[in-house]
Image: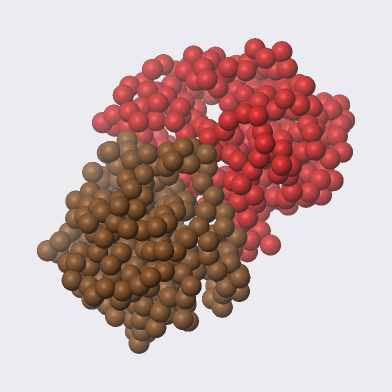
Chain colours: A brown, B red
Amino acid sequence: MATQDDNWFIEHFDSAGTAFGLRLKRKLEEARTPYQHIEMWDTETFGYLMTIDGATMLTTRDNFLYHEMMAHPALFSHAGARNVLIIGGGDCGTLREVLRHGGVASAIQIDIDEQVTRYSEKYFPELCESNDDPRAELRFEDGVKFMQECDAERFDVIIVDSTDPVGPAEGLFKAEFFRHCHRALADGGVLVQQSESPLLHSDTIIRDLHHNMREAGFSHTRTLPFPQPVYPSGWWSCTLAGKNRDVGAFREGDAADKDFATRYYSADIHRGALVLPPFMQDALS
Amino acid sequence: MATQDDNWFIEHFDSAGTAFGLRLKRKLEEARTPYQHIEMWDTETFGYLMTIDGATMLTTRDNFLYHEMMAHPALFSHAGARNVLIIGGGDCGTLREVLRHGGVASAIQIDIDEQVTRYSEKYFPELCESNDDPRAELRFEDGVKFMQECDAERFDVIIVDSTDPVGPAEGLFKAEFFRHCHRALADGGVLVQQSESPLLHSDTIIRDLHHNMREAGFSHTRTLPFPQPVYPSGWWSCTLAGKNRDVGAFREGDAADKDFATRYYSADIHRGALVLPPFMQDALS
C-alpha cells in the first residue's frame, strides 16, 4: 500500500510493519503496462523515483549501492566471466556495472516490461549509458520461460535482479528456477539473486533461498549484506551461489586493481560483506 | 514532524526529505518532562518504540545494532579501559554493553532526563539489566556542564550517545565540547560519538565532526558505518577519536575471544566497519 499526502510518497511495507517515504516535488508521468503500473516522481532530495505497483524500485541518489553490489561481487567471484545474463534489471543499472568489466564479451538483459527501460532511458540516462554497447543485448520477454528453454552451460554469471518474492517474481526464488539457472551455467559459474533484508528476512526468505539454491545443485552459497536506504529496513542483501565454485573467495587483487570507478564497491567492502553478523550466522546455520 | 494515521507512526525527516514508519498496535503512555515530550508505543513488528519530541529513539527489535556499535568498537580500540563515561544513553542499552567488559571498573551514565530511564526500565528491561551492577552509576544532570567541570584524565573511554545535532544536542558535536572530552580523557583514551547517516551526512555532519575532533586535539579519528533501520536512511555510523591512540586498530584477538555474546558486533564486523566505501573516503578526504 502506498499513499501520497502533502507531497510525501509513503510506502507501507505491510508484511514488515515498516514504512519508507520520500518528499516529492511532483509526479512526472505514469504508465499502465500489460504487467504493472509504473510511476515516475521527482523527489526533493533523492532525485527521480520509480515505483511499480506502489513499491519503490530505485532513486537517482542511492541506486549505486544496489547496482554495484548486484554486479561486482558476482563478477569478481568468477574466474573471468565472458557471458553474462541479467534476469529483470530493466532500469539497466546492473547492465552498466557488468559492462565495466572488460573481460565480459556478452551481456543479455531480459526484462518482461519494456516500459521500465523506456522510463529509465528518460529519467536515469546515466544507468543506460551502456545500452548501445555492442556487447549488450536487451530483450523484453519472460525471464522464467527464457531460463526453462536456455541451452546448458551457456552463461558464466547469471544475475537475478528481480522484485520481491511475492506476486510476479515469486517463481524467481524457487528451486525449480534455480535448477534451470544451474543447468544454464558453465562449470564454475556464479548465480546472484537479490535477497531482501538481513534484519527482516534472515530466518525466512534468505534461509529458504540458500536451501533452494543448494537443492538446485549449487555447491556454495553466501549472502552479502549492504545498505539500501529505499528498501524495507534500509538494509539489503544479495546471495551468491556457485556451481562448483567457492563464492566466499574472490579475485581480490583484480578487484583492488580494477580499471573503473565505483562509489560503494571495493575489494575491502567485498571482503567485509562476506562477514555476517552473529545473528545472521545463527539464522542461516 | 511526525504523524499518526491509521495505526502507523510516520516520522518525516524534513531536512533529509525521507520518512520512516512503523505500524502501531497502540500508544502506551507519554510524559512531558522539563526537557522533552516522551512517548511510548507498542508496534506490530518492532516491539516497543520510544519517541522523543516525535523522533524515533529506539525499538525493541533493532536497538542491538546501535548499542553494540556504540560500545564495543570504542572499548576494543582502547588498551584496557577501566573508567567509562556515557553522555546521554538514558535507555541504558549502551551501559549494558559497556559493563559486559570485565575490565571496566566504573561506568557513569549522565542523561539529563530521568524519565527516559524510568520508561526504559519498564519497557526495555533487558537494556537495564546492568543498572544495579555495583560498577554502574546513573546520574541525571547536564552532560555538557559535567564535561566542563570534569577533572583532567579521569576517563579511559567517553561515549556520547546523543540525539541529532539539532536542538539540545547541538553542543555535543562542537569542538568546545570535544576539548572538554579530550581533557577528561587519560592519554590513550578513546571518544566515540554517534555520527548520523553515511549516505545523508558524509560531506556535512560527519566531515565537520572529524574536523572538530581534530581541532580539539584528538590525534586519530575514524568513522564506522553500521545498519540502523529506524534512523534516517537506515544506515548509521559512529565516529571514534583517539587521544594519542590509533582508533583504526583494535584488540582483534580479545574481540574474537570475548566472553560475552553479541548479535551484530564481532571482531570481523569491527574490521569490516573500519573500511569506508569510496564515496565516503572522497567526502572525508
Which residue is pictured at 83% across the width and 32% down the height?
B184
Name which residue lies at 55% across and 69% down.
A251
Seen at 39% across and 46% down, the residue is A197
Picture coordinates of residue B107 (x, y %)?
72, 23
Q: Position of residue A158 (x, y in %)?
A: 34, 68
Q: Does residue B283 appear in the picture of this structure? A: no
Residue A15, compared with residue A188, is above or below; it is above
**Quarter-of-image position of residue B108:** top right
Task: In the rendered view, tell whether residue B181 sits above or below residue B32.
Answer: below
Relative horizontal placement of residue B40, taking residue B76 as reference (left or right): left
Q: Is residue B222 left or right of residue B199?
A: right
Q: Is residue A29 above or below residue A56?
A: below
Task: Pick whichever, A108 or B125, lies toward us.
Answer: A108
- Residue B15 % position (x, y): 49, 47
Is A97 in front, or is B158?
A97
Q: Quadrant of residue A147?
A: bottom left
User: Is A18 positioned to the left or the right of A235 in the image?
Assistant: left
Q: Look at the picture and state if A258 lies above or below A284.
A: below
Quarter of the C terminus of chain A within the rendering: top left
How many numbered discs, if any? 0
